[in-house]
Image (cartoon, grey):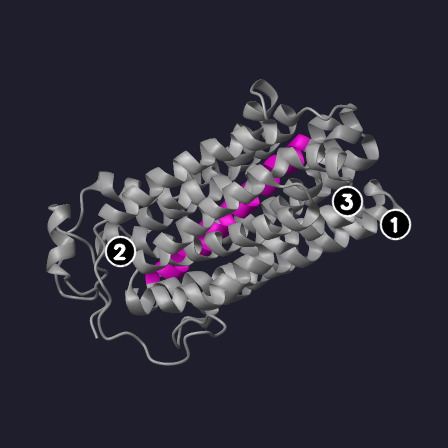
Amino acid sequence: MSRTRTASVPAVGRVGRQGVPMGSDARSSAPLWWVWLAAWPVTAVFVLSNAATPLYVLWQRDIGFSKGTLTVVFAFYIVGLIGSLLVSGVVSDRIGRKPVLLPALALALVACLIFATAAGVVALMVARLFSGVAVGAVVSAGMAAVTDVAGPERKRTAALLASCAMVFGAGLGPFLAGVLSETLPAPTVTVFVVEAALLVTAVLVVLRMPVRRPTAPEKGAWVRVPAVPRGCGRQLVQGVAVFAPGLTATSFVLSLGPSLLSGLLGTTSRIIAGGMAFAMFLAATGVQFAVRHLSRHTILAAGAIGTAMSMVTLIIAVHASSVPVLVTSALLAGAGQGMGQLGGLSLLNSGVPPQRLAEANAALNVGGYTLAGVLPVSAGYLSDAVGLPAGATVFGVVLMSLAVIGGLVVLAGRGRTAEPA
């Protein structure tokens, strides 16, 4: 079976009519600008994923719910995402990227409508659930589509752009929400009108995206825990070991960071809360470009160190009541997630054949988001019981330990796993 990653001829409009199968021996690649454009749907959906972050203080004021309930609302996103990952990767590898991405974008538009009209906790939970389903489809099918468009000679470029599209969108969402909700009327409505417009442009990109249909897809159950082909297990374990703690660190900042910030500053400014999240993910984006030429294992090891240091500074921040240290913790968390994500995606891109790539991406994210769903929710309820500083401290110690273990997993596997080309 050919391991050639499919791409497109430059004549984009001709691809759909030709229906050239994925995995053919054609070596032609789409122009580089199409590789960048293929990453836009990933960015657009991830803008939605965190757009609600600065708005929770408004909903808490208007609806009335605790920090524990807030983390449960956040966890509904994780539930939808993981549920989507159980299906979307396999379906994308079997029937194509577009049949998965287009329904996901439609569901994201529905989530925007629910967010904009939410009047209770249940509506927020449903909107977060739908957002999670859309994100699950995008991190499997969307990120694989970027690799398909890039072609076999641009694997590392594809991994870099797909990963940066994810974290940049995740940071842009809360920043836009913070600014728009502070400067324009109807703060919980305007944000999602703008996001809906971004999603419509993503639909147009997907409709024209030069990706090819699969051929000779893998057999087996359509709904299953995502996995990687035989021989790629070590790459997956190393990726999850670093990506999961990094993602959990940024998830904590997104769910409880605004509460910590408002407690330290005595303000509920949505621009400040959104700005901290944006800075965190901007660090995640920038660090990936900075380390892109390093070996994959070095990137993963650095990601583990970044996450561990973010937890050290988080503990210092809550006990010293220091806003600059808290912001430093957020920046280190972003760097940890960014490097863990890039290292994990690059390892999978280098060794997994295109007909299993979406499922492999889903497997990486199931490992990451499972931890990111459990620990922040636990920290939220613990904070309700013992106070936010004590809850954040326990969370920091636990996650720092997991990050250190992840780094040791990478170092232990480095000698046994050859660095892929």
Mark 2 and mark 3: span between their CA atoms?
Answer: 42 Å
Near mark 2 (Cα within 10 A), the count class, few <14, some 14-19 or many ≥20, is many
The spot of residue 418 in percent (x, y) is 39, 65
Q: Which residue is mark 1?
A: 385
Question: Which contiguous range is marked in magenta?
Answer: 327-350
Main SS of the magenta part reads helix
Q: Quadrant of the N terminus?
A: bottom left
Q: Which residue is mark 2?
A: 148
Name the residue located 55 percent from the left edge and 58 percent from the top edge. 80
- Whether tag 1 and tag 2 are in contact, CB under 8 A, the answer is no
Look at the picture and state if 240 lies above or below 13: below
Q: Residue furthest top?
A: 183
> Of residues 406 and 396, which is closer to you in this image?
396
Earlier-in-chain disc, 2 versus 3: 3
* Residue 325 visible (yes or no): yes
Q: Residue at x 57, y 41 (%)?
A: 115
Q: Residue at x 34, y 64 (%)?
A: 92
Q: Amino acid at mark 2?
A: Asp
Kindly indicate the quadrant of the structure image that contains residue 408: bottom right
Q: Is residue 348 magenta?
A: yes
**Residue mark closest to the camera, 3 vs 1:** 3
Q: Which residue in the protein does label 3 denote?
A: 67
Q: Give the mark nearer the N terminus: 1 vs 2.
A: 2
Position in image of residue 179 (x %, y %):
56, 23
Q: Is residue 120 left or right of residue 137?
A: right
Mark 1, Cα crowd under 10 Å, few <14 / some 14-19 / many 20+, is: few
CA neighbours of label 3 inside 10 A, class few (<14), some (14 to 19), many (20+): many
**Can residue 275 be found in the magenta stretch?**
no
Q: Is residue 173 left or right of residue 5?
A: right
Q: Nearer the viewer, residue 139 or 62?
A: 62
Amino acid type for the residue under numbered disc 1: Ala
